[in-house]
Structure formats: structure tokens, C-alpha cells
Image (cartoon, coloured by chain):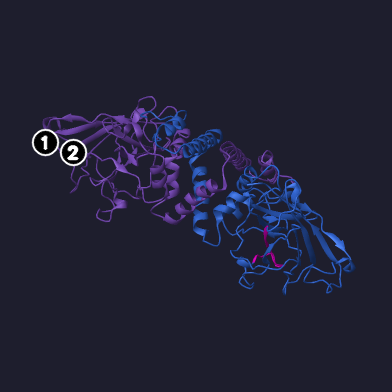
Chain colours: A purple, B blue
Amino acid sequence: MRDVTKDNITDTFLGYFGEQTDPRLREIMESLARHLHDFARETQLTHAEWNKGLDILRQAGNITTPERDEFVLLSDVLGLSSLVDMINSSDDGTNSSVLGPFHVSNPPVRDMGADLRADNEGELILVRGRILDSDGNPISGATIDIWQTAANGLYSSQDPEQDIYNFHALFTTGADGEYQFTTVRPVSYTVPTDGPVGELLESTGRHPWRPSHLHYIVKADGYRDLVTEVFPDDDPYLDQDTVFGVRDDLVMTYVKQPASNFPESGCELSGKVDKDYYLVDFDVVLSKA
Amino acid sequence: MRDVTKDNITDTFLGYFGEQTDPRLREIMESLARHLHDFARETQLTHAEWNKGLDILRQAGNITTPERDEFVLLSDVLGLSSLVDMINSSDDGTNSSVLGPFHVSNPPVRDMGADLRADNEGELILVRGRILDSDGNPISGATIDIWQTAANGLYSSQDPEQDIYNFHALFTTGADGEYQFTTVRPVSYTVPTDGPVGELLESTGRHPWRPSHLHYIVKADGYRDLVTEVFPDDDPYLDQDTVFGVRDDLVMTYVKQPASNFPESGCELSGKVDKDYYLVDFDVVLSKA
């Protein structure tokens, strides 16, 4: 094209593709270019604004390490990560929600009913539920990978003071599909704000907080893997999660219980609880693979 | 928003903005989010594809240095850089075209008619024209900042073998608005292909070539700065410039001339040319500021 104009540049771009281009790649690049070009045309983007956008990417590149990925964080706060989660969620199972960057490989295998608190401070919670198929039948042999923040708002992988496996555990269900464990109430925390994403949040009047949550990855043979989170219904940031992770079916009430209600058996803490605790009931429905 | 869905996430995102947000920033972020979300919804983007996109950005971050900006290159090959140029072009002046990353600060001031070849090989060209306002009147005191590739396809800032000011010059017009200089015919060259942009071009069946060109930045008091390029009409890549820089009014014929036609005065080479040369006529029209 010898006379590229602002009106024909999108078609010119599409005309450059080789005939052998993978059809799915072509589809993605076509949609990307149409939207990118429409964005620039709609906003009448100036050179200074274009360069500011590139600066955000350059700064994200500078601050990104294998442990700290500012590009994922940018996707998170723009709602893209959650949108991709929702697009790829099943229709007949529990909703998925953001994986986040704080999962660790090879979490410690724990017996059902284990107490994850170790030396950590915080309010005692008993989390329990069932892993079910979409007909309501229990799934045996499902694995439940759990992780959460410590009381200081940090995950073990962010905090050199914590053992890397602090608040990480892997459980496997029996024939009843049930699971339970005790831990402390996770806390609300902020996403990292020392990079360009923090600056973007600041300049658009947004806070960097996420409501407190427990992370789950649930897997079972014959079912789709589920990556999700569970939120308490009294968290002040529930209505404005800065990464858009909250779904109706992931919000649970933390129900205060007297010590006398604690299960007499089946938990590592059975017979050892002498104060009020909170009960969190959360059933998970897996979709067929 | 406690129940984010794939249909309401864009509005949820917009609802997070603070009331004090700069209206122009809000406008840009709204358009960006709408297009980004529509892109993901339209393509039903998978997690693997999302991650591949982030990988391109992460790799771009890894390869980018102050001298080599892969994010600008990505913007170039997606047509965004040229589109921003065209959106911000004046309607009554010469079209602008990509600045590129190879301009140097403080180019050497040369007398009108200077020869830029030094020891460089290549076909001799005489480039000349006038700097005019949109009514066709000559502009006195306009500065013309010129740069181009050497015969090996590299700019001085890419090539440690070249003096940093090789093929860089700054001219100033007199009352007649005319300019002229001699140099060698610039060559076609490829954009850098050793990063993720090279991989993207390869996977979409695109070549990395740009048609040969002379770069211009023309400035004059009371007029808008013009950043542009001039292309020869016989370049094989003219119809498929990988960064979309070609505009009709920037394509010139290199007209072969016998040595006897070379100007008898006004050029550093006047009286010294004994072979055929090429004449390139290129008038520049500046828009009022």
C-alpha cells in the first residue's frame, strides 16, 4: 500500500498477512488491530499520549522479574485477567476467579482437617464443604490446593520472614467429597503500588485494595480444573476489588460459633478449641472435562 | 461490584474511577478498556493466548534498552505509530511519517549544498526543493534535519563502525526557501528481528523490510514541526513498508541525470561531478502553528 491513510491502515495491516498464517492467530491479530486502531482514532491520540502509554510498558518491563510481573498486574487492574477467567469459566460449575501470582508449586500434602495456623496470629476459622459434580454427587479423590495471606497481608512468596509453605496446603477428598481445615481469617491487602500500575491507579482515583480471600485450585480426574477464590461477605473492599475477582457465588458468610460447636472429631484442633471461631461453608461444583 | 460478569466488567471498570480523574485520562482509559474487553470477548481469548500476549510484552521488556526500544517497534509493526502520525498530521501541509529510533541530537550544521557522502559508497544523488507555506510562499530560516542509512543498511547510531554523525546534517534556508545537498541513495533495510516483534512478523508471514528513505525534520518559527520521510518510487518494498510509513506525497522519482546537468555552483560538488547522478526534487509544505 503506497498511500496509507488513517482510514485504510487497518485493512492495509490485514493485507500484509501471509496466506499460511494460522487462522486463529489471524483472527486474534485482526481483532487486536481493529480495536487498537479504533482506540487511537476515537481518542485522536496525540504523540505525547502514545509515548506515555509506551512509557507504562517500558516501566513495567523494568520492574518485572520472575517473582514480580507488572504486566500481569496491569492486565489485572484493567479487568482483562478477570474477563479471560470469566470467558473460560464453565456454565454449570462454581465460578473461577483470578489465580494471582502467589501460588507455590508442590504445596505440602496435609490430612483432611489439618490446622494451617502454625505460629500465625489471627481469628480462627473452620472452612468446610464438599466437592461436587454438577448433579450434586460428591467427587472422590479431588485435590484442593489452598493458599492465603498471613496477618501482615503478605503471601509467603512475598515475605522472607515466612516459611515458603506457610498457609499453603493440599488436601484430597474421600468418597464423601467432603473437605475441612482450620486456619486464620485472611486479610485484605493491596496489590504492589511501587510500579507504573500503582501510578495508574493513583491517577484514576482508584485504591489498590483487594478484599480478603482464600485461594482454591480444585482438580479431579474427568473434570475441568477450577481456579477460584472465596470472599467473606463483610469485607469493606468486596464491592470494589481492584482486580475484579468477586463473583456472587464466591461470597460466603463467616458465621461466628461458640467453641462448643467445634467438631468433636475429624479436625486436628478437635477437643482443643476453647474460644469462639468462625465457620465458612463453601461447596465447589466442578464441570465435566 | 459484588457480581462481576463478562458483560458488566467494562462498566464496573469505569465505575471505579475517582471523581477528580482528569477528563482526558478518563476518556482515554474508557476507550482503551472498552476496546480491550471487546477484543477479549470477540476472540473468546483463552488463558494460553492471554499468556502468550503477556509473553510478548515480557520479552519486549527484556530486550529493550535506551538504544533499542522493542515497544516502539511493536507499535510500528502494528500500524499504531503511523496511525498516530496521521491523526496528528495537518490537513494543508506535507504528510508526516515515522520518526523512527535513529535520529541523533545536535546534528552537524552544514552549509547549503553540502556533500554528506564523506567516505561512504553508493550512487550519488542530489536532493533539492523548497520549504513553503500552504500558500506556496518560501519560508526563510527553516531548519532541515536530515538523516539516512549507510550502504550497509545501518544508521550511525546502530553501527559502531560509523561516526555518530555519519549521514546526519542540519541545513537552514535563506530568503528563497530553497535547500539542496548531495548524498548517496539510501538503501532498504530490515527492522530488528531478534526480539518478539521479529517472531510476530515471522508467524504472520510478514517480511521485516522498510523501503529506502531519507528522514526529514523541518521546523520554522510560526509553523508546526514536520517529521517525515521521502521514498524513491522504484523501491521493491514501497507497497509493503512493514511500519506503514509510505504516503503518496512522499514518493519521489529519482531522475537519472548526466554529469553535465550538475549545478555549476551552489553545491560542494559543483565542478567535481564526472558521472551520472540522480536528482530528487522534494518540496515541503509546512502548516501554520
Q: In which image quadrant can residue A96 be found?
A: top left
- Residue B218 in percent (x, y) is at 67, 56
- Residue A111 in percent (x, y) is at 24, 43
Q: Chain of mark 1?
A: A
What's the magenta bit mostly, secondary-structure-wise? loop
Q: From where the camera sits, is residue A101 visible?
A: yes
Q: Residue furthest front?
A: B175
Is A258 situated above or below B134? Answer: above
Residue displayed at 63% across by 66% down:
B107
Q: Sequence-wise, which precedes: disc 2 or disc 1? A: 2
Q: Is residue A276 magenta?
A: no
Q: In which image quadrant can residue B19 be found?
A: top left
Q: Which residue is mark 2?
A: A124
Left-right relation of B16 to B28: left
Are the two marked residues, 2 and 1, in contact with CB atoms closer than 8 angstroms? yes
Amino acid type of the residue that numbered disc 1 sits on in the rendered structure: Lys
Q: Which residue is mark 1?
A: A275
Q: In which image quadrant can residue A249 be found?
A: top left
Q: CA distance from mark 2 to mark 1?
A: 9 Å
**Between residues B41 and B66, which one lies in front from this camera angle?**
B66
Q: Secondary structure at mark 2?
A: strand
Q: Which residues are magenta?
A: B142-155
- Residue B247 in percent (x, y) is at 72, 47
Q: Is residue B153 magenta?
A: yes
Q: From where the camera sits, is residue A131 visible?
A: no
Q: Secondary structure at mark 1?
A: loop
